[in-house]
Amino acid sequence: MNLTRAFMLERIYANDTQYDGRFITGVLSTGIYCLPSCRARPPKAQNVKFFPGPNEAEAEGLRPCLRCRPDDFYAGYDPDQALIETLVKEIDANPERFSDMEAMSRRAGFGATKLHHLFQCHFHVTPAQYLAKARIASACRLLQSGQVAASEVGFQVGFQSLSAFYRQFGRITGLSPAAYRDLNTELVVKLPAPYPVKRVIGYLNRLEDSSVTFETVAETSFGHVPMRLNYSEQHVAVKFLHDVPERKIMYAVHDELIRWLGLRQTTEWFEKQVASKVPVMEKQVKAARGLVVPQTRTLFEAFLWVIVGQQINLPFAFRLMRRLRDELGSQVAGVKLLPSAQQMAEVEPGELLGWQFSRRKAEYLVGVARWFVARDLSLNNICHLSSLRLEQELLAIRGLGPWSVNYVLMRGMERLNAYPIGDSGLHAALKRVSPERWNDVGWRQSHMNQFAPYRALATMHYWNGLKEDA
């Protein structure tokens, strides 16, 4: 894409991180050069000169900005990114040490405004939202130990009141603290209200006809756990297809279930504080309040979906996915599974050509699977990595472009500001929003940036609107 001066000006005024590394902004009046995402005071257009990179800017006597650190960025080091990654590790390990956002700011060494920006940029949540989820995760660990009374757990992980603890715990886990601690023969998760359960289950069960039940398998550190999910508007109930597992396995299954269902996502803030300010999105939200970004059964399945779905229509993509499942996947208690990364890595690309895969798509699938295995990729070992770091790493892999990478971040890693740039379904929805401007790349990006840091949720609502009208 050729970047015009008008387009680049638009991107720097939007502080667009997606164009960091694409060009440098020189501010002639101050003698500095910046990244497009720099949040310093916006320069006047007549004082701006654009450069391909820092070398060209320095050749004209400009020096790097001390705020956005373009020299560090081009050297591959981002001190803010390193700091925020360290901070989230500390929060997850000991959330009780951070009583509020002020405590987080003191530990980070900068003000609340910058802290808020860094959390949204790198982890797609607010600091308060991250802290609340870390506290609930810590509470679950304490409850699993059985050594602390349920009424004391909330205070130990940093909540100031029992009512706030019970409310947050119930919203995220679908259980009371006592019910979670005592998981025994059944697992029934209460859904928030409102919550479009049929639509969410439809995403989880895309290769089969949706009904009020479907069978799946949770992959845990204890092995595969096959189950049947029965759901109503208020609950999702798990029926185990083998013997009821012991309690430690029940905890692991519960963790997977709430991840699939997106119960950790804070949709209320998006709907009340973001979508309500954009009339067209407010209308979409009214049709499906509580809509989340459902997560793929495993992280690798997000990569399968995105590579198989490249440049083909959905019905054909579904056909290819079923072929992968039937030919390469395994069965657990009669439940057919898509192939794991290990199974896919053991295939030679040529073996897929007879199943209507193009040679390039076959090479991408096998290549990504082999990288995935070699990288030993899992949600546990990337949860403290910045979204920007993950995006940069994934874009370096053959077969993964911006659309693919953002889809994986959104559906496989629950990074809610990622959205599939260039997605045909999203384009169709935006064409309805503005038939005159939808084809303008700059307008599309500016429109979606209104919903930051929840562009993934906005995308889900636009996709849902297309299905509702189908």
Image (tube, rainbow, N blue to C red):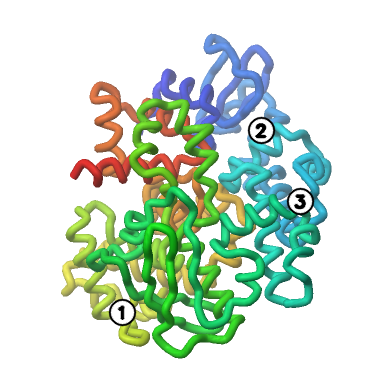
Alpha carbon separation for disc pair 3 and 2: 39 Å
Which of discs 1 and 3 lies nearer the camera? The answer is 3
Identify the secondary structure beneath mark 1.
strand
Towards the viewer: 172 or 57: 172
Residue 4 in percent (x, y) is at 40, 22
Amino acid type, callout 3: Ser
Residue at the disc numbered 3? 161
Residue 405 at least partly seen: no
Sequence-wise, which precedes: disc 1 or disc 2?
2
Q: Which secondary structure lies at badge 2?
A: loop
Instruction: Indicate the quadrant containing the C terminus: top left, top right, bottom left or bottom right.
Output: top left
- Disc number at residue 336? 1
Residue drawn where x is 70% and y is 48% of the image: 84
* Residue type for callout 1: Lys
Residue for point 31% across, 85% down: 334
Q: Is residue 142 above or below residue 465?
A: below
Judge from the rendering whether residue 129 lies leftward or rightward of residue 210; answer left or right. Answer: right
Marks 2 and 3: in contact by CB < 8 Å?
A: no
Q: CA distance from mark 1 to mark 2?
A: 49 Å
Horizontal side, residue 397 vs residue 386: left or right: left
- Near-viewer residue (66 or 286): 286
**Number of other residues with Cα within 10 Å of mark 3, as a class: few under 14, some 14 to 19, many 20 or more:** few
Query: Which circle, 1 or 2, is nearer the viewer?
Result: 1
Q: In the rendering, which numbered label is found on residue 68?
A: 2
Q: Is residue 284 something that shows in the picture?
A: yes
- Looking at the picture, tell me which residue is in the foreground, 235 or 206: 235
Q: Classify residue 208 by image quadrant.
A: bottom left
**Image mark count:** 3
Q: Nearer the viewer, mark 3 or mark 2?
A: 3
